[in-house]
Image (tube, rainbow, N blue to C red):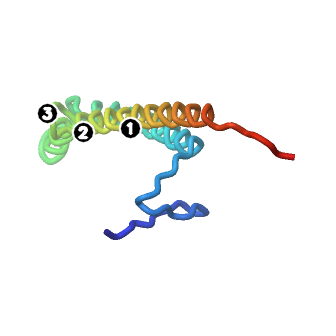
């Protein structure tokens, strides 16, 4: 099996067998996903505007208006529906990050309870 070595600048890559949890990075990812959700929400609103009838007259302009309305309206292929699904997937990722952080915190606390410090100087 080949290890994939992707890392952010200044972060050393971790082999696939070793998994490290960084609450700070998870929090940052959560924040960035929230920001992306805001942008997706704006795009959904804009796509829904495209879904309205666009009275541009007749001829070529009318065809463009019809296309804009069709592109933004209903169905699984519309821009608004695709963006809405993407927004739900982002929310699912945030839920998974929250659950992972809770598990990490719980495991960390359980591990700390079993450590006895004896001696020292």
Which class describes the residues within 10 Å of circle 1: few (<14), some (14-19), or many (20+)?
some
Which residue is pictured at 87% across the width and 46% down the height? 121
- Residue at the disc numbered 2: 82
- Residue at the disc numbered 1: 93
Which residue is pictured at 45% across the width and 39% down the height? 33
Kindly indicate the quadrant of the structure image that contains residue 24: top right
- Residue at the disc numbered 3: 75
Instruction: Look at the numbered disc 1 and give the secondary structure of its residue.
Output: helix
Instruction: Look at the numbered disc 3 and give the secondary structure of its residue.
Output: loop
Do tag 1 and tag 2 residues touch (Cβ < 8 Å)?
A: no
Q: Going by the image, does 79 lie left or right of 105?
A: left
Q: Tag on residue 80?
A: none
* Residue 34 coordinates in the image, percent (x, y): 47, 35
* Residue 23 coordinates in the image, percent (x, y): 57, 41
Residue 63 or 95: which is nearer the viewer?
Answer: 95
Mark whose residue sits in front, 3 or 1: 1
Sequence-earlier tag: 1 or 2: 2
Which residue is pictured at 23% across the width and 34% down the height? 81
* Residue 90 coordinates in the image, percent (x, y): 37, 37
Sequence-earlier tag: 3 or 1: 3
Q: Going by the image, does 54 lie left or right of 46?
A: left
Residue 21 or 65: which is nearer the viewer?
Answer: 21
Which class describes the residues within 10 Å of circle 2: few (<14), some (14-19), or many (20+)?
few
* Residue 53 coordinates in the image, percent (x, y): 20, 30
Do tag 3 and tag 1 residues touch (Cβ < 8 Å)?
A: no
Name the image quarter holding the N terminus: bottom left
Q: Going by the image, does 49 lie left or right of 102?
A: left
Do tag 2 and tag 3 residues touch (Cβ < 8 Å)?
A: no
Mark whose residue sits in front, 1 or 2: 1
């Amino acid at each position: 099996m080949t290890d994939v070595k992707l890392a952010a600048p200044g972060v050393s890559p971790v082999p696939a067998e070793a998994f490290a949890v960084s609450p700070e990075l998870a929090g940052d990812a959560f924040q960035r996903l929230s920001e992306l959700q805001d942008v997706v929400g704006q795009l959904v609103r804009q796509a829904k505007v495209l879904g309205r009838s666009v009275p541009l007259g007749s001829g070529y302009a009318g065809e463009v208006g019809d296309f804009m309305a069709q592109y933004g309206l209903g169905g699984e292929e519309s821009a608004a529906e695709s963006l809405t699904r993407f927004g739900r997937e982002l929310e699912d990722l945030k839920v998974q990050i929250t659950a992972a952080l809770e598990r990490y915190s719980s495991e960390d606390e359980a591990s700390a309870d079993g450590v006895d410090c004896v001696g020292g100087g």
